[in-house]
Image (cartoon, helix red, strand yellow):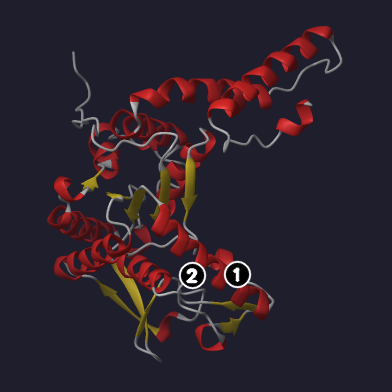
Amino acid sequence: MNLQTQIPITKEVYNPINYDSKTLLLGSCFSENIGDKLDYFKFQTNQNPFGILFHPKAIETLITNAINDKEYSDVDIFFLNERWHCFEAHSSLSSPDKEDLLKSLNQQIKSANKQLHGSTHLIITLGTAWMYRFIETDVIVANCHKVPQKKFLKEILSVDEITESLENVISLIKSINKKITITFTVSPVRHLKDGFVQNQQSKSHLLAAIHQVIEARNRVHYFPSYEIVMDELRDYRFYAEDLIHPSKTAINYIWGKFIDSWISESSIETMKEIETIQRGLNHRPFNPYSEQHQQFLGSLQRKIEDVKKRHPFIKFDDYSSLK
C-alpha cells in the first residue's frame, strides 16, 4: 500500500555538486538549512553574505551591488534602538558601532563579488513575494529593522515583476560567470504573518515566475523543496512547534532528496567518511584517559588525515584537540 505521493527527482548528470564545486546560497532562512548541511559535510560553500533575504528584489539588489562593487557610506545606514542598520541587509549585520557596520557591509559586498565570480553553483531560495517600500525614499527594503510599519507601504510583487527580477539576476550573474549553474527553490517556511491566503498567493507568484525562467540548457534549474513539504510531508508533525518552520525531520528528508538530485555519486563515499568523523568529534567519552578512548582518537585522527590528503581545503573545528 502506497501512503505517500512522491515528487519525481532526477539526478543532475551534467554539473552535479562535488567536492571540487564552490557553492553560494542566497535567500530565505531555508537556504541556510541546506547551506548548513553542505557545510556539515565539508563542501566548499558560502551563504548569505548580507544575511537572510526573503524576497526577489532584495536578492537582485545584493547581486547588482556586489557585481558593481558598491561602497557603502553614511547615506546607506541609519540609527534606531541603539543600533546602526542598513535596509539592504539583515539585522544580523546591524551593530551599535557605525564604523563597524560600514566595515562589515563593505567587506561582505566584496566577498559576495568574489563568490559570484568564483562559484560553480548558486542556489537561490525565495521566501515571499511580499515586500515593504520605505515611503520616505520610495525604496524597496530587504529588512524593516523594526522601523514603525506606518513608514512603509506593503506590496506584493506580481508574477511579471518577479520574472523580470529573476531574469535580471540570471543576466547579471552570467555576465561575469558564464559557466555557473543556478538553482531556484521556494522556501516551505509559511509566512503566516502575511495571512494564510496571502501566503499561498505569495508562494504561487514565486512558483509561476520561477517556471518562466528555468532553462536546463542555460544551466538554470528548479529544486522542489516547497512541493516536497506540501505533497510528500502533508502533516503538521513535519513542522517545528511554531507550525511555521519545517522540523529537523523535514529538513533531513529534503536534504536526502537534494542529495539524490544534486550531489555527485563520486561524493557520496566521502560524505559517509565525513559523517563518521563528525560523529566522532562530537563523541563525549566516560573516561577520556582510557586506552580504549586513546585508540579511538588515533583511529579518528587517521581518518581525518586521509580525508585531508584527498581534499586539503577541508578543516575540522576540533581537529587540533586530537593532536
Residue 154 is situated, as x and y percent measured from the top left of the image, at 32, 77
| The image quarter in which residue 105 lies | bottom right
| Amino acid of disc 2 | Ala
- Give the crowd class for mark 1: few <14, some 14-19, many >=20 residues within 10 Å: some
User: SS class of the residue under badge 1?
Assistant: helix
| The image quarter in which residue 277 lies | top right
Question: In which quadrant will I find the C terminus?
Answer: top right
- In the rendered image of this protein, does residue 20 appear above or below residue 108? above
| Amino acid of disc 1 | Ser
Residue 286 is situated, as x and y percent measured from the top left of the image, at 80, 16
Identify the residue shown where x is 71% and y is 31%: 319
Q: Residue furthest top?
A: 292
User: Disc 2 and disc 1: Cα gap in Å?
Assistant: 11 Å
Identify the residue shown where x is 12% and y is 57%: 212
- Give the crowd class for mark 2: few <14, some 14-19, many >=20 residues within 10 Å: many
Residue 95 is situated, as x and y percent measured from the top left of the image, at 64, 72
- In the rendered image of this protein, does residue 107 appear above or below residue 31? below
Viewer-side label of 2, 1? 1
Give the residue pinned by disc 2. 89
In the picture, the disc for residue 104 is 1
In the picture, the disc for residue 183 is none
In the picture, measured across the screen, residue 179 lies left or right of residue 164, that is: right
| The image quarter in which residue 85 lies | bottom right
- The answer to whether the residue labelled 2 contacts the one labelled 1, judged by CB atoms less than 8 Å apart, is no
- In the rendered image of this protein, does residue 91 appear above or below residue 268? below
In the picture, measured across the screen, residue 111 lies left or right of residue 234, that is: right
Viewer-side residue, 247 vs 69: 69
In the picture, measured across the screen, residue 128 lies left or right of residue 41, that is: left
